[in-house]
Structures are given as C-alpha cells and as structure tokens.
Image (cartoon, rainbow, N blue to C red):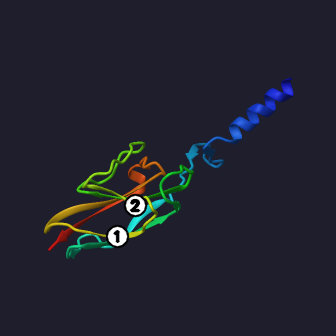
Amino acid sequence: MRVLIIISCVLMFSCSDKKKNISSGKEVLEVVENTKKVFFKWPKDGSSVASPVFIDMGVEGMQIEPAGVVKEGYGHHHILINQKFWPEGGVIPTTDSTLHFGLGQTDTSIELEPGKYIISLQFADGVHVSYGELMSEYIEINVE
C-alpha cells in the first residue's frame, strides 16, 4: 500500500504544468502557444473595396466541415458585420449581420452599402457554438 501511495505522488507531480528550474530552484510555468486561428486571405485590414465585397477565409489548426455534427477540432466559418467576435460557448444566430457558411465554404461575396465596417471571421462548431475570441479575427474596411 505504501508503494502505491509513493507511485501515485510521483505520477501526480510529474504531470504538473510547472517546471522547476534546477539552477535557481524557482518554478517556471510552461507556456503553450495557441496554433489555431482564423484569418482573412482577402480583404486586408484597412482596404478600400467595392460592393459586392469578396471575402476569402482561412483557418489553421482546425478542419472545416459542414454544419450538423459536432467533432473536436472541426467547424465552419461565420462572418460578423460590425462585431469583433462572438463569445465562446454562445450559439451564433442567423441574422443580417451574422452570416453562416455551414456548407464549409471558404469564400463569399457580400453586398454592403458604402461606408466603414468591421468584418469579423468567427469559427464555430457543427451546431454553430462559437469557439470564442481565440478563433476569431476582425478587419476594418471601407466600402466605396
């Protein structure tokens, strides 16, 4: 029984996110970089464009799949007009300012009146539940 307790303690401490710096004796937190992201291939931030506005969407670290099934690491794009991101865990509704690409589309053209806009990409799962700010990107454009 004593051996089992010792083994359990060793395993518990070896799985910690904290690392001990042997030379200084101080604990160091290990930082893991988020490699998942969405991005605009086109247009670029600050662009002046004509309507209809062509939008080319990209994603890294996750796979695109049509809506309907929830699978870890999968989802599809949404475009938010004049909003920077959709909160994590919230279902993105279909409205005039929240556009769904549930067939797995990666580009589109949207009609916009002349003016300045914030256009956001938001990645969400198969039932439109947002992955939140870490899986979003926004740009500002001017439609002439």
Q: Earlier in the sequence, mark 2 or mark 1?
A: 2
Question: Which residue appears at 69% of the width and 37% of the height?
Answer: 13
Question: Which residue appears at 63% of the width and 44% of the height?
Answer: 20
Question: Which residue appears at 50% of the width and 51% of the height?
Answer: 68
Q: Secondary structure at mark 1?
A: strand
Between marks 2 and 1, how big is the CA–CA gap? 9 Å
Inspect the image, locate mark 1, and give the three-letter code of the amino acid beneath it: Thr
Inspect the image, locate mark 2, and give the three-letter code of the amino acid beneath it: Phe
Q: Secondary structure at mark 2?
A: loop
User: In the drawing, does residue 10 fall left or right of residue 88?
Assistant: right
User: In the drawing, does residue 117 fall left or right of residue 59?
Assistant: left
Query: Which quadrant of the structure image shows residue 38?
Result: bottom left
Q: Residues within 10 Å of mark 2 (few under 14, many from 20)?
A: some
Mark 2 vs 1: CB contact within 8 A: yes
Quarter of the image that includes the C terminus: bottom left
* Above/below status of 140 relative to 8: below
Mark identifier at residue 64: none
Return the residue at label 1.
108
Quarter of the image that includes the N terminus: top right
Question: Which residue appears at 83% of the width and 28% of the height?
Answer: 4
Residue 83 lies, in percent from the top left, at 26, 53
Residue 107 lies, in percent from the top left, at 38, 71
Return the residue at label 2.
101
